[in-house]
């Protein structure tokens, strides 16, 4: 009986494999990770540095605005620079929505987004129209709507060329004092988050010393899974809240785009910072170490996808309002979304479970 060409190739492959892998062998399973060591590594070298950067940047921003309100000349450029630093620091930390950031309303108090109806602009305008004195105290401001707090509100005030906070009239002075209260409240919130991570009995200790009878973590695996869940959530935020609106902006040139930090011109840098931070979290967790050799293509694909994003995403997301109805740019953005989505699915459905981490429901929609 003659052997077909396909059968011959199949037999050859089997023979080669039998030489490489003796009968009865299977790909070696990686050693089980130490979940406590994973959590300690991620907290100390990833989480805390990012929230401390947010604390430092927002503190510098508050100091800049205080000098403007005291009458210093030429301070607005410095304030805008430190606003950008604070926004990019937030981009690196915004998807860490567990631990101290699980308190209801905290993420929105840092950045009220998405805001499709322009609520931040309207509510800031209402405060200015009333000259609401209670909004000038960071303590009482923190009890008001999240739309008049954080980066969204500061972007409205700092990037308003028609009504600058550097003016000499009563309206400008109120705007400046309001911006100062917002910046100080945000800096105070960042300091609270750092203290709640690193303080005595804080979230670092809770994650590293889980209590089988207590909350929020009964095992080290449960604690470590929050980092994987945060990574999946962060990638979905980039995909759905940042890249998708850019694709829509190009595909519907008759509609004004609604992009994060569009007024301040930081949309592209914001997304690039978020992607870089997601990559850093993935690498710090060391998830690829738990992948068996027969599935080694998965971490290789993820590494290549992150490299592609680092190379191509900055140009793809730059100056979207000026790239309307540009099909080449739309294709580039769709490739960005493809790679972000691919990383998200591989991590959530394959690589995290291989490391013993159950992702389950994420912050956004439970995918």
Image (cartoon, rainbow, N blue to C red):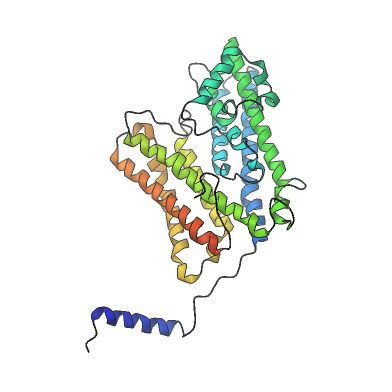
- The reply, left or right, for residue 198 in relation to residue 69 is right
- The reply, left or right, for residue 48 in relation to residue 345 is right
Is the residue 270 above or below the residue 254 in the image? Answer: below
Using the image as rendered, state which of residue 2 and residue 157 is in the foreground: 2
Residue 129 position, x and y percent, is 56, 13
Is the residue 239 above or below the residue 141 in the image? Answer: below
Is the residue 290 above or below the residue 360 in the image? Answer: below
Residue 81 position, x and y percent, is 54, 31
Examine the rendering and report whether any part of residue 166 can be seen: no
Residue 324 position, x and y percent, is 32, 33
Quarter of the figure with residue 132: top right
User: Which residue is rendered at x = 69% and y = 24% of the image?
Assistant: 140
User: Which residue is rendered at x = 54% and y = 64% of the image?
Assistant: 354
Using the image as rendered, state which of residue 266 and residue 81 is in the foreground: 266
Residue 110 position, x and y percent, is 59, 34
Residue at the limit of the structure toward the right, as seen here: 200
- In the picture, which quadrant includes the N terminus? bottom left
Using the image as rendered, state which of residue 153 and residue 74 is in the foreground: 153
Quarter of the figure with residue 157: top right
């Amino acid at each position: 009986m003659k052997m077909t060409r396909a059968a011959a190739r199949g037999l050859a492959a089997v023979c080669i494999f039998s030489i490489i892998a003796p009968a009865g062998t299977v790909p070696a399973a990686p050693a089980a990770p130490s979940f406590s060591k994973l959590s300690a590594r991620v907290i100390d070298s990833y989480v805390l540095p990012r929230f401390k950067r947010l604390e430092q940047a927002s503190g510098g921003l508050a100091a800049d605005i205080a000098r403007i309100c005291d009458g210093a000349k030429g301070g607005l450029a410095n304030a805008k620079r430190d606003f950008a630093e604070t926004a990019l620091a937030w981009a690196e930390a915004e998807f860490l929505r567990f631990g101290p950031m699980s308190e209801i309303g905290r993420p929105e108090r840092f950045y009220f987004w998405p805001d499709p109806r322009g609520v931040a602009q309207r509510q800031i305008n209402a405060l200015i129209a009333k000259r609401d004195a209670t909004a000038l105290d960071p303590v009482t401001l923190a009890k008001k709507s999240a739309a008049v707090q954080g980066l969204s509100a500061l972007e409205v005030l700092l990037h308003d060329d028609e009504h600058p906070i550097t003016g000499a009239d009563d309206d400008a002075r109120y705007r400046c004092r309001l911006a100062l209260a917002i910046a100080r409240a945000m800096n105070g919130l960042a300091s609270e988050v750092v203290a709640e991570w690193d303080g005595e009995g804080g979230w670092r200790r809770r994650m590293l010393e889980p209590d089988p009878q207590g909350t929020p973590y009964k095992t080290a695996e449960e604690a470590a899974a929050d980092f994987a869940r945060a990574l999946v959530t962060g990638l979905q935020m980039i995909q759905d809240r940042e890249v998708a609106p850019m694709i829509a902006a190009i595909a519907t040139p008759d509609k004004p785009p609604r992009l994060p930090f569009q007024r301040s011109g930081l949309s592209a840098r914001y997304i690039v910072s978020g992607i870089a931070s997601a990559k850093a979290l993935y690498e710090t967790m060391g998830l690829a170490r738990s992948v068996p050799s027969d599935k080694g293509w998965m971490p290789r694909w993820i590494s290549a996808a992150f490299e592609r994003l680092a190379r191509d995403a900055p140009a793809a997301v730059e100056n979207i309002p000026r790239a309307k109805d540009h099909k080449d740019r739309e294709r580039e953005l769709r490739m960005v979304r493809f790679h972000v989505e691919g990383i998200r699915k591989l991590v959530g459905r394959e690589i995290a479970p291989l490391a013993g981490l159950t992702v389950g429901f994420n912050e956004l929609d439970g995918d």
